[in-house]
Image: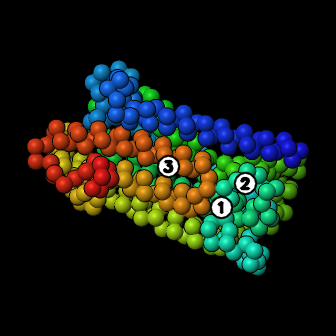
Amino acid sequence: MMIASLVMELGIVWLVRAAWIAAVLPMVIASIPSSKLTSFHQLVLGFAGRGKILHPSSQKWTVPQKYFAHFYVFGAAWTTLLLATTGMYACKTAPLSSEEFHLSDIASHLTGGSHVFSFHKSHLTPVEHRFKVWRAVFLLVLMEIQVLRRLIESFYVFKYSPSARLHILGYLVGLFFYTVAPLSLCVNVAPEVARFAGYQVAEFIAKGKSHTSAAPEFDILSSLSPLMKLGWCQLIGGIIFLWGWLHQRRCHAILGSLRDNPSQAKEYIIPHGDWFEIVSSPHYLAEIVLYTGLLIASGGADITIWLLLGFVVGNLTLAAGETHRWYLRKFENYPANRNAIFPFIY
């Protein structure tokens, strides 16, 4: 049974990693400065095109850009499901009390409980395993905060032009991202959480509503108190995440305000304010910052989350480069001090 469990856990972990590698590899190849790869570079940019940077030749294979909302509707539902099941599993099977942290656990606790070569809970002490479960809950809480804000923005902040289009492959990649990204944050505990959820459903079916009526009261504050006992990596990562989150919210508000006036609905304006004073795509930079926060909060030892961040950096850097070049072609008076996405670098 233990061997089968290990195979299942390794299987889903490496499946998710393989998906990220397959998604990142085309961007890595396209970024190689070689004349022989020019056609491939243009192909990747064409698939990533949206809105003002969509190439005219790609118009045939597009959907309305307002379909961006689909990503966040699905992402919010999927992340909520993962958070609810992982959180319930943590509360019922992985209690974390401060008394359990002995001197031998202090080093692991301060570094976020990271174990580079740990693939299964049998390699961890009981406290370390419970710490890993609650760390996954913490990461999912941060992801939930992000997707819920993006969902609200897609309906109430962004005012997409009726003519704005999104390449169909870019649409599918967006759905892929909001499927695999939340899962990547809890993939190391996903098999045991799935077994727990299956058991709970089976128990509910077998015992019926009479079982649930006798269930004890659920105190959400005491149940989530272990989140306050996590390490410095989680604290620092959470702060960096919120820093990027707040700046992205401000930058999105600036972009949304550019179309508040009906007379501006069909014209582009140079955005100003916040990180727009230093880069052309500060909302992309902020997204990279907040996913870097997630990586730090994870402890930095999980290759899966490194691959997730690699995809975010590669995808947004390509899009930001195209956006910056578009601004330079469109506006003769475009601020010369702005870089594409990384201040003073690119």
Amino acid type at mark 3: Leu
Q: Secondary structure at mark 1?
A: loop
Query: Mark 2 highlights which residue?
Result: 118
Where residue 136 sits in the image (x, y, percent)? Answer: 64, 57
- Eyeballing the image, is 44 above or below 219? above
**Sequence-first tag of 3 and 2:** 2
Q: Is residue 84 left or right of residue 236?
A: right
Q: Which mark lies nearer to you, 3 or 1?
A: 1
Secondary structure at numbered mark 2: loop
SS assignment at label 3? helix
State the residue position of label 3.
Answer: 309
> Residue 155: percent from the left, percent from the top?
40, 47
**Which of the 4 quarters of the picture holds residue 325?**
top left
Query: Which labelled disc corresponds to residue 345?
Result: none
Residue at x-position 33% and y-position 59%: 250
Q: Nearer the viewer, residue 280 or 144?
A: 280
- Seen as rendered, the residue at the extreme left is 332
Residue that badge 1 annotates: 114
Q: Quadrant of residue 34?
A: top left
Rounded to the nearest angstrom, the CA distance separating label 3 from label 1 is 18 Å
Crowd around label 3: few <14 · some 14–19 · many ≥20 (10 Å): many
From the top left corner, tell me how far across and down residue 3 is, in percent: 85, 44
